[in-house]
Amino acid sequence: MLTRAGKASPLIGKAETIVAVLLSLAVVSLHVIAATSAGALWRDEAAVLGLATLPTLGEVWTNLEHEAFPILWPFILREFSSLVGPMNDPAFRILGFSIGLCVVAALWFAARTFRHSVPLSSLALLGMSPSLIVWGDSIRAYGFGIAVVLMAGALLWRFVEEPSPARFALAAVAAIASVHALFYNSVLLLAFCAGAFAVCALNRAWKKSALVVLIGLVAAISIVPYATTIRDARRWDTVVRMPDYDLAWFREMLDETLRPAGQWALGVWVVLFALAVFVGVRAVRRPASLAISPREREVALFSIVTLVVAVVAIFLFLENLSYYTRPWYYLSLLAVGAVYIDAVFGAVIHSPAHRIARLGVVLLIAGATFVPAVHAVRKRMTNVDVIASRLSAMGRPDDLVLINSSHTAITFARYYRGTARWMTVPFFDFHRFHRYDIIQKNMMLADQRAPVRPVIDRARETLRAGHRVFVVGQLDFSTGNEPPNLLPPAPLPGIEPWPERLYNSQWSSLVGDFLQTHSTRIVAVPVMVAGPVSDYENVQLFTAEGWRP
């Protein structure tokens, strides 16, 4: 039996390498599909680029409260844009694709660091995740932040495993870079430091543990300058906060993040997470029962502490933030989860039977994921550029274009080159990046018709003169014959004092009711786009014409 197992191990090792390479090629193919399908930049991408390309770096820093990221990614985008040009969408898609490849490389680097040679579970669970590919490859900071934080965790482990000044410096630099890429990387770095400290405590290596704390402390001190940015954002971010961020919402959003890979995805993740923690705890407490080395025991300890602390810390971070989160908020947590689940299994699985079983599970997950992933990543990010191009061609100088969302207006402003005047519903004249502070001021007005009065006045003039009013986005209409009851100025009493969606719906209804009452006809204009479009920015186009007093 021993001889047979010994001879089988090299064959299994080759099989693992072949599977990892094939999975990597499949992942790369998904990134290629995503990059070639994404098309124009959607509003959040246009917004971060609009901020990054402000005239001076000082203005970027001053306006950083209006973005979700620290300074590092806007700075990278600023420098990249200066090389390729701010309107070079193909170049930005290549940049996103390159970042995606960096994440794949980080999975391989982590596998080598923890000495299970090749990434298996992490490629199947994370690498093929449609949410990671779509949002990680967008020109937001998510993919970059994931790549950097995974490198920070691996380099911290390398320092713990074999301390040296060079390894300390590399770990510290990676830690600092990670927290300047994504704000919530700070709590993931805390999880890494907790895992590293646990290993040092196990070995009573107190000097080493002090250096681990120092790495975390240096990274924490480096983000102190953002205190003013965060304080300024807290003045208006009530508009995007939800009344009660809880475990149910956390679970629901994890499910939404993973669901594009299949309805089963969250269940598989939960089972593998629980199994990794269970096996990891056993490896730490009874290493002899699993026939693992002291080093593999330390990997298991580092990994399970990191996994548990990461989940708890991210939940507490998001609970304190209390935003209506979307899938991209959870990608870094999933990245850490996938890598350290892989590390636990790599440390404790050695017998041929168990290695073959792991290969089977990995292939089953990858096989079930690939086809849904192809469909999920083969999407345009927006159709607003197509609408903007069409309106640029068909609109006349005396026509009016209404954008029924200040968010959609960011994309429209990037691509519209026509002669017709355009306005947002509600009206405000800043469209470079998101300005929730302006929305908040509109919500606080005593006269809730004021935010749309300039829009209605201009639409009246346009229709009376015999010209057309185009509407980008679906207008709301009041039910019944009575005009809508206007909301009082925010904040409202109750558990949701700043319901942005209700105010936006109210303003949309006021404009919609005016057009429905005073135009002779409203018709949909077909928008022809090749292939599916992301639900986050797939809007309609209408035209209203004729005048009815």
Image: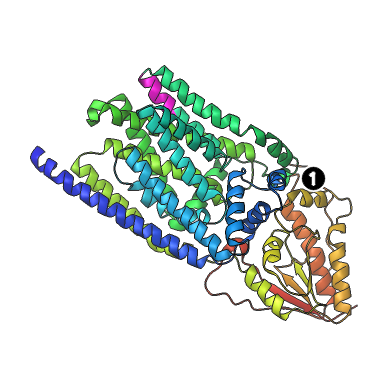
Question: What is the quadrant of residue 4 in the picture?
Answer: top left
Does the magenta run of residues contain 307? no
Q: Residue at x 72, y 55 (%)?
A: 501
> Where is residue 144 shown, x and y percent of the image?
51, 48
Q: Among all residues in the image, which is located at the extreme right?
A: 549
> Where is residue 45 shown, x and y percent of the image?
61, 57
Query: Label 1's element?
Result: loop
Give the residue type at disc 1. Answer: Leu
In the rendered view, would you say 549 is above or below 327?
below
In the rendered structure, the answer to whether residue 40 lies left or right of residue 370 reads right
Question: What is the quadrant of residue 200 in the picture?
Answer: top left
Q: Residue at x 22, y 52 (%)?
A: 15
Q: Is residue 325 visible?
A: no
Quadrant occupied by the C terminus: bottom right
Count of marks overlaid on the render = 1
Colouring convention used in this rendered image of the protein: rainbow
In the rendered structure, the answer to whether residue 84 lies left or right of residue 201 reads right
Q: Is residue 74 visible?
A: yes
Q: Residue at x 57, y 40 (%)?
A: 180
> Where is residue 443 shown, x and y percent of the image?
81, 51
The residue segment tinted magenta is 195-203
Quadrant occupied by the N terminus: top left
Q: Residues within 10 Å of mark 1 (few under 14, many from 20)?
A: some
Taking depth in this image into account, of 411 and 50 the one nearest to the observer is 50
> Where is residue 155 shown, x and y percent of the image?
42, 36
Q: Which residue is mark 1?
A: 492
Does the magenta run of residues contain 199? yes
Magenta region's main secondary structure? helix
In the rendered view, would you say 384 is above or below 9?
below
